[in-house]
Image (cartoon, rainbow, N blue to C red):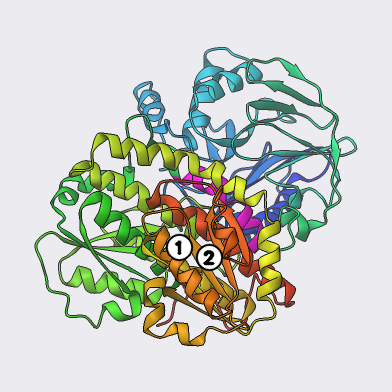
Amino acid sequence: MCGIVAYSGPKDASKILLEGLVALEYRGYDSAGLVTTHSGIFKAVGPVAELKKKVPESVGGSTGIAHTRWATHGVPSELNAHPHEDCGKTIALVHNGIIENYQELKSALQKAGHTFSSETDTEVIAHLYESYKTAGKTPKDAFLATLRELEGTYGIALIDRAHPDVVLVACMGSPIVIGIGDGEHFIASDPSAIVRHTKKVLYLNDGEVAIVTPRECQVMTLGAKKISRAPETIEWEVEEAKKGGHAHFMLKEIMEGPEVLRTSARGRLRPEEGDVKLGGLLSITHELKRIKRITIVGCGSAYYAGLVGKYMLEEYAGIATDIDVGSEFRYRGLPLEEGAAVLAVSQSGETADTLASIREAKRRGLLTLGIVNVVGSTIARETDAGVYNHAGPEIGVASTKAFLSQLEVLALLTIFLGRQRHLSDTEAKRIAKELASIPEKVEKILKNVEPIKRAAERLKGATNALYIGRKYNMPIALEGALKLKEVSYVHAEGYGAGEMKHGPIAMIEPSFPTVAIAPRDSVYAKMISNIEEIKARKGPVIAVATEGDTEIAKKADEVIHIPETHEMLTPILSVVPLQLLAYYVGVAKGYNVDRPRNLAKSVTVE
Ligand code: AGP
């Protein structure tokens, strides 16, 4: 996600814009830029502080727009930083979201003589608006006509130097809020850039447009039908606004899970065809067809996501899949095989151990792929091809929304590779349709947190805990244990439930709780046996079970229900309660769950 700020009023716009960008920097920080109706464009790579160095004391102009970027299309660079202009340099705009049909729009505009200066999807909007203005349309009609051609998501603020006190604003799947001041208006991606000026705000809904001047804010539909709506008053201060009103970034990011799952699949998942389009892999489609073996590498949660991916790829893409933590991969004498590939999973794209593994794989001449969240990061640049998560910046040190996105992208990759091999049309459609329904199933879990809070009450006094699962949910037992360790410092161990008899069951006693992940899947009966063995030794059991399962309630002490889904996709649902469980225990123990002790968000040292 990126940060948009705009202003129209009597004051010096550039000061207000820079201040707003600082408040929004948590939304994206690889580059930033600003422009007013009376200034040139200022851009800088890196944090807003770099932009500040380039902007003179006062650039003039009391109407302007600004942007802090989280790259999705086009690496972080000054060229790709927003604002973007038209050919005539009379229009500038900033955008948050993804324009899915930008390639076809761009080629049509280029054929019509427009020249582009960036690799972004955003720039097509400026040239499209220009083409309508040149055709004689008013700013409003040119803007509406432009928006009607866009497919995908956008939050837009656009200025037209021919109309120096107007900001044209639009919202579709990417938030826009308008602050109403006295003879001035503030526009931003979220209230954290507005609350210091005014608490009176108007949220634009998807499909709405606003024409904003210092004294007016005219809201309408894409069809130009006027809308009148009373403004709201927000009570947040800046810091709370950054967290969307949640107490911590970790909670905010867990709650963002459904939206992140939709964004990660947007323009990629084709449920009706049971297929997937992964633009980042198009250049190596033939090499992918020839792959006979994949080795996944990652660290921490990324490794556990990869472990789920191993089960997916083997069962549904029919590809032998190996996996290793980044720190160990390099010590293996991996035989160089024809058709071998290495897949790195990394949110930051900078984890030293994972990067070292990719470099080792390249040294051995293996095909390297990446599933990475940060566009333009080192792993993204050094792998031969890959798929970006588009999960937006993850501020909490503990990976939550990014982990969900990693599981989803691994499912997309499984369908893609499976369709190249023997995955049947029926099965592919079944998985794809179920994957499309996963975001609303996560929403359902997030709407019923009471059982999770009760489970946290049981765990917060524990000094140890065991997490167990089988098959697709064995990695989720490992991830759930890591989450609890990371944010609450309670020692937790994740185990394949089948291993209980080979040692761990010796630990079971009334003070030693077990979290058992037991959805109705192909290994459910065995999980029930594990739960019974634990109960026979008076161990408390918190079970994650499929909604409607009344059997398990007779055996477990607490039951957290998740909706039914395809077995391959249960990890995306079963991990959500475990993320919240760790969060509630960490908060109950009074720890800083956003910045746990001793941990860094990205481990760039070996
Ligand atoms: C997850 O909660 C941790 N913060 C950590 O294990 C993390 O997943 C690991 O360091 C890998 O980071 P990456 O995804 O950025 O490579």
Judged from the image, the secondary structure of the residue bearing numbered disc 1 is loop
The image's mark for residue 399 is 2
**Residue 268 can be seen in this image:** no
Number of numbered labels in the structure image: 2
Q: Quadrant of residue 310?
A: bottom left
* Residue name at image x 86 percent, y 45 percent: 199
Q: Give the image location of residue 91, x and y in percent.
A: 58, 31
Magenta span dominant secondary structure: helix
- Amino acid under disc 1: Gln
Judged from the image, the secondary structure of the residue bearing numbered disc 2 is loop
Q: Image check: 495 left or right of 417?
A: right
Q: Give the image location of residue 44, x and y in percent.
A: 55, 56
Q: Are marks 1 and 2 in contact (CB under 8 Å)?
A: yes
The image's mark for residue 25 is none
Mark 1 or 2: in front is: 2
Q: Which of 387/131 is in front?
A: 387
Q: Give the image location of residue 137, x and y in percent.
A: 59, 13
Mark 1 or mark 2, earlier in chain: 1
The image's mark for residue 347 is 1
Span shown in magenta: 249-264
